[in-house]
Amino acid sequence: MKKHLLKMMDLSCEEIIEIINLADQLKYELINGIPHPILLGKSLGMIFQKASTRTRVSFEVGMHQLGGAALFLNSHDLQIGRGEPVEDTARVLSRYLDGIMIRTFAQSEVEAFAEHGSIPIINGLTDFAHPCQVLADLMTVREYKGDFDGLKMCFIGDGNNMMNSFIVGGLKVGMQISVACPEGYDPDAGVLEFARNHGNFELFRDPKEAAKNCDVVFTDVWASMGQEGEAELRRKAFKGYCVDEELMKVACDDAMVQHCLPAHRGEEISAEVFEAHANEIFDEAENRLHAQKAVMAILMGEGQF
């Protein structure tokens, strides 16, 4: 059995549903003032090599609500930033902590921590994957739509870490998935191979084709963290890929919109569509807290999915 959360590809449908079910329960308990100190006395190390708002706050608050403590570590705090091998850092921190969350660039770094450490490792974001966000997204979709059966979801924009995780997570829970991105900005080749072998998946160059009859429309920034130097080039490449009122006309009348934030109004999403769906988007942001608490409770409380 697995004791880490590294990427959506590692999870089965049953494990995804288990996480979402527990997240729903923890959210209910928090709203109703029911304490759940599942991780009393335990400590989470949070390694940040990429800046964050939602990830840091949601993990730190989540550990507090679960009865544990969270320790913030950035590259300036760690010898890993001055050349200590990842495998040594992983083994040292495993002697002090009960779990590690890492937000970094290379997926290989997260995988190395899992290989060499002896405690649960949670991927808080890499250039390849963002599993915590997609678990929160799926939780939000089920809150609004009641079930995954028969739903069609689309992702309009860059084939980035979010699209990679979105495709895998959506297909694993049984939804029909379509994506639209310009030539040269496709998702990871391994993800595309998984999706095409799985079925219920289409990739389009025309955003309106991808959004046709969709129940859920996702988007994300065109230039991810670390790609700021490509911002102008990407604005040109992604012209026509804005989730705006025209695009929403081809989706289902009751379609919901999701954005993992921060949002650039007027680029990947229009201000009008963002505000019309703000409740859904900020419920999605809140659900990062609950989904991550479920992941920590399962991994650090029981040690496995």
Image: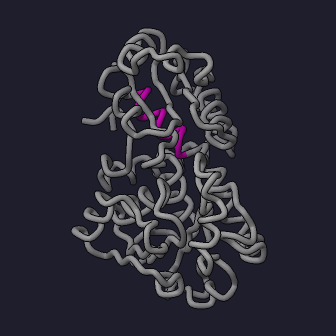
Image position of 61 (left or right of 212): right
**Residue sitting at x 51%, y 36%:** 104
Say whether residue 172 is magenta.
Answer: no
Image position of 64 (left or right of 85): right
Q: What secondary structure is the magenta-colored segment mainly?
A: helix
- Position of residue 227 measured from the top left corner of the image (x, y, whole percent): 58, 51
Highlighted range, magenta: 291-301
> Residue 17 versus residue 82: which sits nearer the camera?
82
Instruction: Name above or below for residue 237 compared with residue 19.
Output: below
> Residue 19 versus residue 282: which sits nearer the camera?
282
- Position of residue 212 measured from the top left corner of the image (x, y, whole percent): 50, 87
Identify the image quadrant of the C terminus: top left
- Total marks drawn? 0
Residue 70 appears in the rendering: no
**Residue sitting at x 47%, y 87%:** 209
- Position of residue 27 measured from the top left corner of the image (x, y, whole percent): 60, 46
Identify the image quadrant of the N terminus: top left
Q: Quadrant of residue 242?
A: bottom right
Image position of 108 (left or right of 155): left
Q: Quadrant of residue 245?
A: bottom right
Instruction: Name above or below for residue 22 compared with residue 273.
Output: above
In the displayed image of the protein, which residue is found farthest to the left?
A: 197
> Residue 282 versus residue 184: which sits nearer the camera?
184
> Residue 258 versus residue 268: which sits nearer the camera?
268
Residue 54 appears in the rendering: yes
**Residue sitting at x 47%, y 47%:** 127
Say whether residue 296 is magenta.
Answer: yes
Q: How is the image coloured?
A: one colour
- Position of residue 257 measured from the top left corner of the image (x, y, whole percent): 62, 71
**Residue sitting at x 42%, y 76%:** 178
